Amino acid sequence: MDIYVGSIPFKWKDARLKEIFEVYGEVTSAKIVIDKITRQNKGFAFVQMPNDAEAQLAIESLNGAEIDERKIVVNESIPNNAGSLDKNKKKKPFVKPENKEWKPFRGNNKGRRD
């Protein structure tokens, strides 16, 4: 199960994050998101735990917990494409109308004074 961890202290490293979650079970990955330009921790991370029961226990136990003077947010990660359109839907190809004459755009007359 993929887990989102938010409001983490900026001084944390991946090892600290993994150490906190390993109390609840096996952790396959613990990655803190880093800003590409400043190379600083962005304040959130993702943890992967193979056992869903252990992951759920970690979420319930750590969500809202105060660690290193920060109240962290822990919940199941939502995939980035969760709100995207149906991928099975076929796209219609663009077909240029053939019998239309080209006319330059002259703008609209709204608000025009004569």
Image: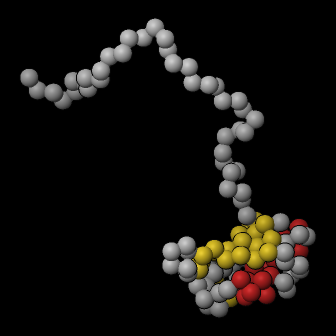
Name the spot of residue 97 as percent of width and height, x first: 49, 14
What residue is at 74 percent from the left and 87 percent from the top? 15
Query: Please, is residue 83 above or below residue 114 in the view?
Result: below
Name the spot of residue 73 as percent of width and height, x first: 67, 75
Residue 32 visible, this orientation: yes
Q: Quadrant of residue 106?
A: top left
Quadrant of the frame with the N terminus: bottom right
What residue is at 89 percent from the left and 80 percent from the top? 25
Query: Please, is residue 2 above or below residue 84 in the view?
Result: below
Q: Which residue lies furthest to the top in this view?
A: 99
Name the spot of residue 7 as percent of width and height, x first: 61, 78
Q: Which residue lies furthest to the left in this view?
A: 114
Q: How many marks?
A: 0
Query: Please, is residue 66 above or below residue 2 in the view?
Result: below
What residue is at 46 percent from the left and 8 percent from the top? 99
| Residue placed most toward the observer, 69 or 101 | 101
Residue 59 visible, this orientation: no
| Residue placed most toward the observer, 35 or 114 | 35
Judged left or right of residue 57, residue 100 is: left
Judged left or right of residue 37, residue 109 is: left
Q: Which residue lies furthest to the bottom in this view?
A: 68
Quadrant of the frame with the C terminus: top left
Judged left or right of residue 111, residue 103 is: right
What residue is at 65 percent from the left and 91 percent from the top? 68
Name the spot of residue 48 as percent of width and height, x first: 80, 71
| Residue placed most toward the observer, 59 or 44 | 44
Applied colour scheme:
secondary structure
Judged left or right of residue 22, residue 112 is: left
Q: In which quarter of the image is residue 67?
A: bottom right
